[in-house]
Amino acid sequence: MATATKTVSYGEWLTMPIVEDAIEEVVDGEIRLMPPNKTAHAKIVQTLTAAFVRQLDESKIQIYGSTFGLVIRKEPLTCRVPDLALFIKANVVEEDGYVHSPPELVVEVLSPSNTPARVREKLSEYEAIRVPEVWVLSPEVRTVEVFRLRGNKLDKSVMLTDGPLSAQSFPEASVDVDAVWPD
């Protein structure tokens, strides 16, 4: 016998209590709880954040780690928690304490629980809100896949295993792919 999954509306979700020590995403109204990231994952995000902070003007750029909600759509409610997102401050739209505008760059660091279907799902959602660039980092194989918006589609632009990497929106900030991976 199939079990029906309860879905929540945007309004219901706003009044729900916060779950401590978990990451919560909502996909098509279904709440998905995920455990906190492991240290290797956190180190990668920290390394990238530090590189961007050193090279970008924080008076113009907003950098968020996996501590914020990015609302993809209100109906059916979909809210993601990217590992890292970079915004031009002037473009950020905040409502009800959540971001409702596309970042210029999203970075996702894969975890063992990230199936190819889940990665495609996230890319499709980022594509729907017109995120111009998404980096997908795979610590297991030490690769960075770069997806760039062409027309209405996020297409894989390049896969890197080493060398410098810059986002199209932030060419002044370069990240050394080799230096991203924890020892």
Image (tube, rainbow, N blue to C red):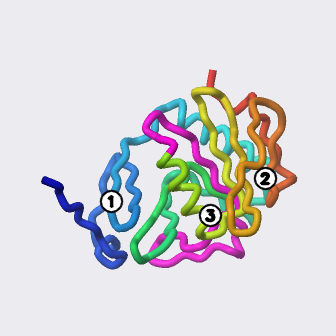
Question: Any magenta on residue 12?
Answer: no
Q: Earlier in the sequence, mark 2 or mark 3?
A: 3
The answer for how far apart the CA atoms under marks 1 and 3 are is 21 Å
Above or below: residue 11 compared with residue 85: below
The residue shown at (12%, 53%) is 1
What percent of the width, then of the height, locates residue 47? 66, 38
**Mark 3: which secondary structure?**
helix
Q: Which residues are magenta?
A: 87-116
The residue shown at (72%, 49%) is 156
Image-quadrant location for residue 99: bottom right
Residue closest to the eye, 175 or 168: 168
| Mark 2–mark 3 CB contact (< 8 Å) | no
What percent of the width, then of the height, locates residue 76? 39, 73
Q: Earlier in the sequence, mark 1 or mark 2?
A: 1
Left or right, 178 with respect to 24, comes to: right
Q: Earlier in the sequence, mark 1 or mark 3?
A: 1
Tag nearer the camera, 2 or 3: 3
Left or right, 135 with respect to 24, comes to: right
What residue would you read off at disc 2? 167
Judged from this view, the residue extending furthest toward the right is 172
**Mark 2: which secondary structure?**
strand
What percent of the width, then of the height, locates residue 14? 34, 73
Decide: few, some or many residues near mark 3? Use Cα within 10 Å; few <14, some 14-19, many ≥20: many
Above or below: residue 133 compared with residue 181: below
| Mark 1–mark 3 CB contact (< 8 Å) | no
What residue would you read off at disc 3? 127
What residue would you read off at disc 1? 31
